[in-house]
Structure formats: structure tokens, C-alpha cells
Amino acid sequence: MMKKRWVRAVLLVVALIIAAVVLLPFFINANTFRPIVQDQLSSALGRKVTLGHLSFSLLSGSLVANNIAIADDPAFGTAPFIQAKSFYIGVEVLPLLFHHQVRITRLTIDSPSIHLIQNQKGVWNFASLGAAAAASRSGAPAAIPSFTVGQLTIKNGSAAVSSIPATGKPFDYSKVDIQLSHFSLENSFPFQLSANLPGSGSLHLSGVAGPLSKTNAAETPFKATLHIKHLDPVAAGLVAPDKGISMVADIDSNLASNGSFLTSQGKIQAAHLQLARTGSPAPKPVNIDYAVSNNLAARTGQLSNLAIHTGSVAVHVTGGFQFTNQAVLLNLHLSAPNLPIDQLEALLPAFGVQLPSGSALRGGTLTANLAITGPATATTINGPVQIANTRLAGFDLGSRIQGLNPMGGTSGGTSIQSLRTNVNSTPQVTEFSNIYGFVPAIGTATGSGSVTPAGALNFNLVAKLNGSTGVGGMATQASKTFGGLFGKVLRYTVNKGIPMTITGTAANPSIRANVGAMLR
């Protein structure tokens, strides 16, 4: 009998609990708490927060708003900074039920649209978030002395990043998930952020941030690790397809900011890397190490080292840059001191160095000291380049010179003892001046030329044949054998040089000796 009474009592308690869970929300007008919650959130953020109709869920211990809108900084427009159809406000249940006190424990915004805007001075529209709370921390009275929540979550959001005035279409993030734990305006807090990038990329950022800057939320100190997978700048809309810059990159980086300076150090693995309009994607992935620091207020940065690895060697880039709304302006220096060509060859196509079809460089060294200036997507590259003691295998230069075919050519490729020039590459054309080349089997060549973005060659050279070997040796011997005009022409050829032109493309060059000019 006692057992039955005990069972009935338990069942009665369970029934009462179920009834309370089911019926209590119907007796609580949660909407009466809407002004209180709006005021608390507005005071904490320093922005007007507008909530839709509120309902109460005892099971989840939360107030549920059917929509939320957080106003933007008036300097950036009247459209909401954040807008969502569902907003969950976790509260302490007993103070809410018995004392009508709203003590917020967690916040969840479901599927919001977020608008991030930067003006011409580099100021972001989220910079003034928390301004009212910051004023209270500076001594002014405030409705909420300290705003804290156990967890602040944004899930399945979308974010559009744009500028004023607009310089292109917004950069869109999708499936944005953000989680702040033990969030406080006064102290640091851990955070996690993940998002999908345009072009099938993804981003994950995690670390510790805070306390919130009193003057500019964008200058809040933080430390974090960043992982980006499959970043395609062209597919993402960061770089126009006609700029000649492309890759698919994975990035692993460590970030740290003290509010004034942001430092970043990490690694990039770039597949299909191309860095010039006249270039083509590198056949193998390229590993890049970098270390960079940014002055947030001045919007300037310093690249202390960027090492582009290929094989066992690296090309190094250092220098400075500046952010503007229109572009990132570069002032960099590339150094490639006496590097083995066999190690560099896989990287040459990315920089626009193309060889005749079916040929390859074997052995020797490359030295380059180049200044890289101007907008990042429309740079000017200027400086000396030199190749020494290499062999252009698969390309018989002597036999390809039209007009000198009867003289024969080289065999098994072309040995190049020295080739040097000054390069000046702009978005419009790549010019080569002060060209000097020495091919032992043929002779020397000097002159200048250019390559268009489409790859068309236009070079004017003067070639002096080597008088003792190869083609030049044949010409010297012939000048001694033949008399008259032909002998004079050959002697002139050996002593003064032959005007030559190179047209066509790098893959299929047309090399012609100007015999008419030689005869004149």
C-alpha cells in the first residue's frame, strides 16, 4: 500500500512538472519583457536594438524573439548592421518568473544577415560597437555596469563586406558561425569563427580577444590561429581574371594584435600559382613562408620576409605596403641571388618566363634584383636579371635563325654562357633593355625588345658572330674562301654584326637575320 502511494506521489509530481512546462508559458506574457531586453542590449552595444514579438520557453529557459535588428552606425547608412528572423535570449528562469527580472545568460542569433562596411579613412561600421558601455567604464553612469553573458552565438549567418564608396561587388561569406564564451566588455574571452568563402573555400579562426577597446572595437586586442582552405582569389572576386594573378591556396597563420599593430606569421601552399599576365600556372604547388606587421591606424604594413620556396631554394620578397579603399599599394623588393636554375625552373612560368615549346633550361644560375611597386593587381616590376652558364635543351638556336640556315647551327640544344637584361614590366607591356647575350657556338647579341600581355614578341638585336667556332667560324672561313661582294658581306658580318629581329611568341619565336640591311 505504501509503495502504491509513493508511486502516485511521484506520478503526481511529474504530472505537475509537465503541466507547468506546457501551461506556464501561456500564463506569462513574455512580450512585457521586450522593452527591458531591448534597453539592456542597446545599452551594451551602443546601438539601437529592436526585437519582434517575444515568447517564453520554459524547457530551454529562454525568451524567443521572432526577429531582431541591430542598427548600424548612422555614418554608414540606415540599413541594419545585423538582421535576423530568430533570436534566442537565455535567462535565469526563477528571477524572471517570481521577480520579473531579466538576467541574460546566453544569446543566440539564428541565420542573420551581417553587413560589414569600411569607409575611405579605413574605419569599419562595427568600430563604434560598445561605445555606450565604454563611456560607462570611463566614469559616466550607465544602465548596465557590466554586460556579460555565458555564451554569445551566431549560427548559419551570412556576411557581406563592402566599402564606401563602393569599389566592387561585396565579398560574401556564407554559413558564418561565431561563438564567444564568457563574453564580457571588461575582460578577455575565447572565440571561434568559421565561414565558407566564395569559390568553395573555407575559413576557421579561433583564439582569445578582449577586453573590448573603449574607442574602436576594430582595435580590440586578440591572439588567434587562422586556417583557410581552398582560397581562390579569382573565383572569390578578390582579383579580376584579367590581372594575371591566380592560385588555389591553403593558409595556416598565427595572428596577434595589441590594438595598434597586427602581426601575422604563417605558411601558404599555393597550387596553380600565377603572378604575371604573360605567365602560366606553376606545374607544382609552391610553398610560401611569410611574416608581416600592420600599423592599424596608419593602414600601412611591413613585409619582413616572404620566402617563395621551390626545390631547396627560395626567392625572397621584403618591403612595405599601404591599404587604400581602391587597392593595396606595394613597395617591395625581390631578391634571387645566384640561384640554381634547375631548382627554379618549375617556378619560372608563374613569373611570366616562357621558353620555346619543347625546350627546357638545364644547369646554370639565375640572379634577379627587382623592385615591385604600384597596386597589387597592377604592379610595375623593374630591375636587372641575369642567367649564367645554362643550356637551353631542345632548342637549336643556330638552325632557327632564318637567313643563316646555310651556315648550319648548333646541335643538342643551345649553350648560353651569359644572358642579362634590365626588365621593366607594367600592365601594358614588358620591356627588356640593355640586352646582352653570349652563346659560344654563335656569338654575342645586344639590343632591346618587348613582350605584350598577349605574349607577342618584338625584339631588335645586333648579333656579332663568333669568329672561331660554330656559325661564326663557318662565316669566317667562308669570307676567306670567297671574294667579291659575298666575301665582304661575310667579313662585315663577323666584324660589325647582323641586325636581327625576333617576333612571334615565346613558345614559337621567329628569329630572322636582316640580310637586306646587312647588304646595304
Image (spheres, helix red, strand yellow):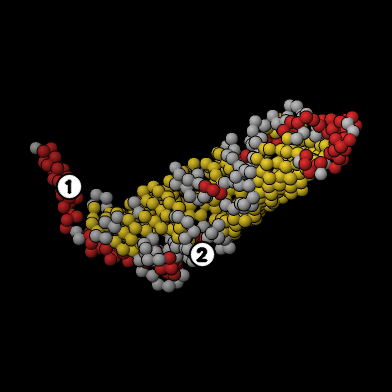
Q: Give the image quarter of residue 297.
A: bottom right
Q: Which residue is mark 1?
A: 18
Q: Secondary structure at mark 1?
A: helix
Residue 486: x and y in percent read 85, 35
For marks 2 and 1, give the one nearer the viewer.
2
- Position of residue 218 measured from the top left corner of the image (x, y, whole percent): 49, 60
Q: The residue under label 1 is which amino acid type?
A: Ile
**In x, y percent, where is residue 135?**
44, 70
Q: Which residue is painted at 55% across and 44% down in the image?
A: 246
Mark number, residue 132: none
Which quarter of the rendering shows the C terminus? top right
Task: Give the CA distance from mark 2 to mark 1.
Answer: 58 Å
The residue located at (64%, 36%) in the rendering is 507
The residue pinned by badge 2 equals 120
Q: Quadrant of residue 499?
A: top right
Task: Choose top left, top right, bottom left or bottom right for residue 308.
Answer: top right
Q: Residue at 79% x, 30% y: name it.
A: 407
Q: Secondary structure at mark 2?
A: loop
Say whether residue 17 is visible: yes
Query: Quick one: 392 or 503, which is closer to the camera?
Result: 503
Q: Image quadrant for the N terminus?
A: top left
Please report contact status of discs 2 and 1: CB closer than 8 Å, yes or no.
Answer: no
The residue sitting at 79% across, 36% down in the picture is 439
